Image (cartoon, helix red, strand yellow):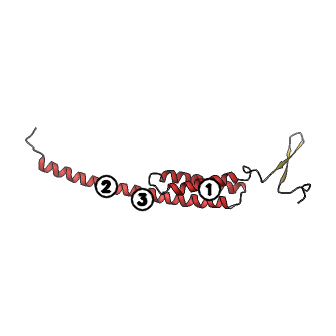
Amino acid sequence: MDNNNLDYEKYKISYNVDADSRVDEKIIINDNTNSISNGHGYAVASLVLGIISLVSCLSVILAIVSFITGMIGIVCANHSSKIGFKGGIKTGGLVCSIIGTVLSTIIIVFALSLYACVNKSYNQSYEKEKTTYEFYYEDPFYR
């Protein structure tokens, strides 16, 4: 492609009309090599956060961190696609973030239900031992 020809997608002209009917013309150059303007940085952030989410969801302790990083990764991937980035990095980050978020949600729900069951059975056994102890060892005349 000849460098003297203007690419329509690369240049955008905007006109601002003031109250005095003065026209300001601005030429905005959309250069796709700039990684911030086309969403490449958000796509890479999405991929990194998705991988962190996948790795940290394997631990019950880090499941909350996995959930948070997965949600941020999903937001970064969506923002990257809104800016106009199309690529495998964004798709990989979105998939990793979604899988990490779902797995961490399952692990958090499982851990909380397991804690509730264990706590309930412990409280029931404690109450049973307490009433048995009071029944056998409490002396009403000892005061």
In this rendering, which labeled residue sits more in front, label 2 or label 1? Answer: 1
User: Residue shown at 24%/54% (left/top)?
Assistant: 125
Judging by the rendered image, the residue that carries numbered circle 2 is 120
Marks 3 and 2, Cα distance to the nearest angstrom? 15 Å
Q: Nearer the viewer, residue 93 or 98?
A: 93
x, y percentage for residue 115? 37, 54
Where disc 1 sits, the SS reads: helix
Left or right: 71, with 78 as reference point: left
- Residue type pointed to by label 1: Leu
* Sequence-first disc among 3 and 1: 1
Residue situated furthest right in the rendering: 4
CB contact under 8 Å: marks 3 and 2? no
Q: Residue 47 carries which label?
A: 1
Where disc 2 sits, the SS reads: helix
Where disc 3 sits, the SS reads: helix
User: Residue shown at 31%/55% (left/top)?
Assistant: 120
Q: Residue 139 carries which label?
A: none
Marks 3 and 1, Cα distance to the nearest angstrom? 26 Å
Residue 70 visible, this angle: no
- Residue type pointed to by label 3: Phe
Q: Residues within 10 Å of mark 3 (few under 14, many from 20)?
A: few
- Residue type pointed to by label 2: Lys
x, y percentage for residue 94? 61, 59
